[in-house]
Image: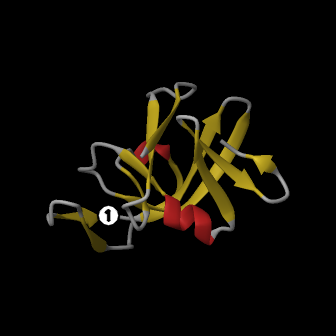
Amino acid sequence: MAQTESDKFSKKQVWFIDSGCSNHMCGCKEWFYDLDENYRTTVKLGDNSRMYVMGKGSINLKIEDGVHTVIDVFYIPELKNHLLSIGQLQDRNLEVVFNENKCKVYHKQKGLLL
């Protein structure tokens, strides 16, 4: 697991890059710029408990000098940590590299994203 932070927003954004989660997940409704609140499902956590997904949408992450759009993010109001799914990143043809105590995410044409 790796963590990225950005305090350019009204609330500090802390995201964990997680190999164990199947979907991007966020608990802050105000971070979504596009949210389908009719989308409903549940997610199963590592301790076998379940949480309700109360929508799915898109979030803009401002990291350093760039803005990165993350789509298909589950909105889970009870979630304490915000998660970026390595699987979903790879499904978008992004490369995730862990090296020298750092995690980097690359796009084939755009280069280093975060």
Query: How many numbered discs, if any?
Result: 1
Q: Nearer the viewer, residue 101 or 39?
A: 101
* Residue visible at 34% across and 48% down in the picture: 27
- Where residue 76 appears, as percent x and y from the top left, is 31, 56
- Where residue 94 appears, as percent x and y from the top left, is 67, 61
Left or right of 14: which side holds 102? right
Residue 35 in view: no
Instruction: Look at the image and tell me in which quarter the C terminus lies.
Output: top right
- How are the colours assigned in the image? secondary structure
* Residue visible at 14% across and 64% down in the picture: 49
Asked if 107 appears above or below 39 in the picture, the reply is: above
Left or right of 83: which side holds 88? right
Asked if 105 appears above or below 43 in the picture, the reply is: above
* Residue visible at 60% across and 71% down in the picture: 91
The residue that mark 1 highlights is: 54
Asked if 67 appears above or below 50 in the picture, the reply is: above
